[in-house]
Image (cartoon, rainbow, N blue to C red):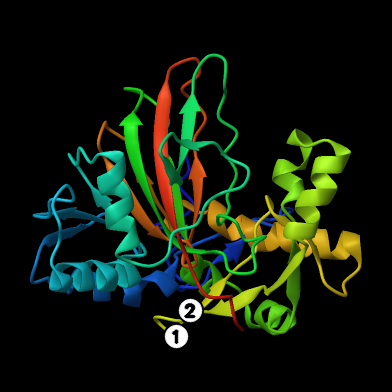
Amino acid sequence: MTVMVDKDPADGLGTKPVNLPGYPVMSGPFTHLARERDRLGELRWEHFDARQVGATLGAEISGVDLTSELTAPVVADIRRALSEYKVLFFRDQPVSAAQHVAFAARFGELEVHPFIPSNIGQPELVRFEKSAQVSGFENAWHHDVTWREHPSMGAVLHAISAPAIGGDTLFADMYAAYESLDEQTRERIEHLDAVHDFTRAFGRMLDDEQRAAMQRKHPEMRHPMVCTHPATGRRHLYVNRVFVDRIDGVDLDEGRELIDRLCRTADAPEHQVRLHWEPDTIAFWDNRAVQHYAASDYWPHVRIMERASIIGPRPVR
C-alpha cells in the first residue's frame, strides 16, 4: 500500500471552513464559538450552581427549588443566567400548575395562546398532550409566536410526562448563527424585514370565517430579520420557516431561498444543545436568543408538556 501523505489532511487548511466540492456545504472549525464558550465557562453564581452543557448555550441549574417562593435576588440571578446561557435546565422540579405560572410571572406578563388548548384552570399554561392519537408536529426549528406584535421574550416548559426514549428538545443559538454568516450576507439582510403570519401553522385548523376573524385580531406582522437583543445588546437572527411567509419587498422565490439558507444555520450541531426530558424537568429559554425543535421520535408513546410564555417587547433592529 502506497501512503501519499505524512501529515493530517487538515494541516495547512487554517481555521476557516472549506466548501465541500459540488455542494453548498461547509466543513471546518466553528472558531466563532470560542470566545463565548470560554466566557461562559468562567461564570460563577451566588444563589445556585450552573453546569455549562453546550458550547455557547445551555446550563443545568442546581440548588434552586422552583416549588418555593424565590427571593428577588435569586430571581435576578436567574434572569441574568438566562441572558448569559440562553436556555436553563432544572431537574426534579415537581411544580403544580399554579407554581409554574407564579414562577414564570416573576419575569413578566404572561401570554394566553389563542390556538393551543390550555391547562384547565390556568389559561396561561398551554398544554401539549401527545399520544398515539395526537402526534407531535413541533419538529421544525422556530421561535414561538413571532406572528405577534410583541412575541414571547421567554418560555418556561414543564415535563408532566416524558417517554423514556425520544421526545428530546433541541435549542440553537441565534447569536452564533448570525456570527457564522459571511459579511456579504450580513450586509444583505441588515435592513430587511420578514413577514410573519400565524396562518402558516394554525390556519388549517380554522374555517374561512374563523380564519378571517383571527386575521383581524392577528394581522401579518413585520419584524427585522436581524434584531438587537434588548438585554444583551447583541445581534441575532430572527427568522424561521414555521411562521415567516416572505421577505418584505423581495421576490418571493428569491426570498424563500434566502430564508431557507439562513434557517439552515440552526441545523449545525455546533450551534445546538439537546435536552433529554424526565418527568418534572423544566426548561426556561430566551425566545429571542434561541430557536427550538421538539424531536418527534416517540410515537405512539405519551409526552405531556405545559408551557408558560412571557410577553416581550417588539423586536427592533
Secondary structure beneath label 2: loop
Contact between labelled residues 2 and 1, with CB atoms less than 8 Å apart: yes
* Mark linked to residue 208: none
The residue singled out by tag 1 in the image is 233
Residue 317 visible? The answer is: yes
Q: Residue at x 67, y 50 (%)?
A: 242
Find residue 78 and report its image quarter.
Answer: bottom left
Seen from the viewer's position, the closer of residues 137 and 257 is 137
Q: Residue at x 26, y 76 (%)?
A: 39
Q: Residues within 10 Å of mark 2 (few under 14, many from 20)?
A: some
Amino acid at circle 1 = Gly
Seen from the viewer's position, the closer of residues 96 and 268 is 96
Above or below, comparing residue 93 to residue 63 in the picture? above
* Quarter of the C terminus within the rendering: bottom right
Amino acid at circle 2 = His
* Mark linked to residue 229: 2
